[in-house]
Amino acid sequence: MKIIELKTTLFEFELDRVMGDANSPRGRTKSASCLVELITDEGLIGLSIGGGNSIPQIQSLFEGIIKGNDPKSVYSLWKKMVEKFFKGGHDGIANDAISVLDVALWDLKSKINNEPLWKTLGASKKDVNVYASDIALPMGDKEIGDWYKKMAKNYGFKAAKLKVGLDQDADLKRLEIMNEAISQNTNNPILYVDSNEYWSPKQTIRKVSEMEERFSLGWIEEPARRWDFLGLKKISEALKTPVCAGENLDTLGDFLPYFHHRAADVIQVSQGMTGITGALQIADAAYGLELPVTLGGSTGIIHAHLANAIPNCITVEVPHPEPETKVYEWDVKIENGYAKLGDKPGLGITINYEELSKAKVKQISSRSGPSPYGRRQGAGLYEVPASEDEIKEASSK
């Protein structure tokens, strides 16, 4: 069997809520992605969703490395893709291209085996601990409360994460709102907070220390800039709350300062780190140092498949318990605060091609990316609260 064809389809869709973090208080209500399909000479299709900004790199890797090869040779093809970008560095858009193709290869390999991804990865089928994540700093207090009440009631979440960073009083109030919502399922809700690299180390220590006076926190996520491993270490040593970091790193090499300096207490791993293959390498390295890892949000909740193959994974982020668009559906279900894995071959994602044709676009709009406004003024230096115009724009969406 050989891979003979690549298809890429850009599409956009409306979100179910206004989403954003400390860097984007205006928020966004639209998202975009790309369906990547690898097709074999026997008609099997391996798919992946992502890489919308890296289509030229995806096409280049396909033509130069993947086309004509055995789809079961995932590790060999991954190594060739990484080495292709060695000189210029396989970060950024190059990393996105490698990641999305690697995921499609794993989907294809699992389908050839006629088994779900978790089984191909050598995992057992067991429930995966998950937490609800609003990613919705621009929403009002009532909307935040209603959303977490829904997550607790409909899906049984016992843990949740809040976006923080621009207004300490508002953050403390929202922590209480989230805590109250999740407490309907447990007497000991796990509360995570995420400042998305907006604070400096000293700002983080001051603000989280105040939060610790009222709440027991599971972790503070990205409390300083990703490359400031000494600052992250300083935060970890100063607080009771564990430091969780690494979300925006790309490769195992990027994590070496974190490991060497013990800069983070919980390591963030994802398919976006040169794919499933790269994510497993980073998780293995963390396991060797007895560091826990967590997996971020993923289309199809496919990180639940990886979680069962990673012995040191403690939880998985879920921003969307159910599909946010009619373009696809998946067979991972969230019940009683756990992800229950399905048995469909591959990732368990099914594409509705009729809906895809409706959502198809020639070019991704500027306001559809995960961070359409870039890094916020003052980040890591001083605070810039949301302006009246930003608040007004967010509330109108």
Image: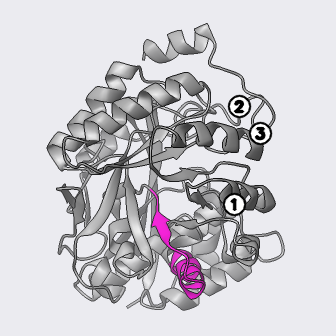
User: Dot 3 surroundings within 10 Å: few (below 14), some, or many (20 or more)?
Assistant: some
Q: Three-letter amino acid code at disc 1?
A: Glu
Query: In terms of secondary structure, where does tag 1 sit?
Result: helix
User: Mark 3 sits on what residue?
Assistant: 380
Residue 28, can we see it? no
Mark 2, secondary structure of its residue:
loop
Q: Can residue 352 be found in the magenta stretch?
A: no
Q: Position of residue 20 (x, y in %)?
A: 52, 33
- Is label 3 or label 2 in front? 3
Q: Residue at x 43, y 34 (%)?
A: 175
Q: Which residues are magenta?
A: 277-296
90 lies left or right of 145:
right
Q: CA distance from mark 3 to mark 2?
A: 9 Å
* Circle number at residue 376: 2
Q: Position of residue 320 (x, y in %)?
A: 32, 46
Marks 1/2: CA distance?
27 Å
> Counting residues from the N terminus, which is met first, the one under dot 1 or under dot 3?
1
Q: Residue at x 19, y 48 (%)?
A: 155
Kindly identify which numbered label has been placed on residue 237. 1
Q: Looking at the rendering, which quadrant does residue 194 occupy? A: top right
Q: Which amino acid lies under the numbered mark 3 shown in the image of this protein?
A: Gly
Q: State whether residue 118 is above or below residue 240.
A: below
Residue 317 seen from this side:
yes
Q: Quadrant of residue 316?
A: bottom left
- Residue 158 screen position, x and y as percent: 27, 51
In this figure, what is the number of numbered marks?
3
Q: Secondary structure at mark 3?
A: loop
Badge nearest the viewer, 1 or 3: 1
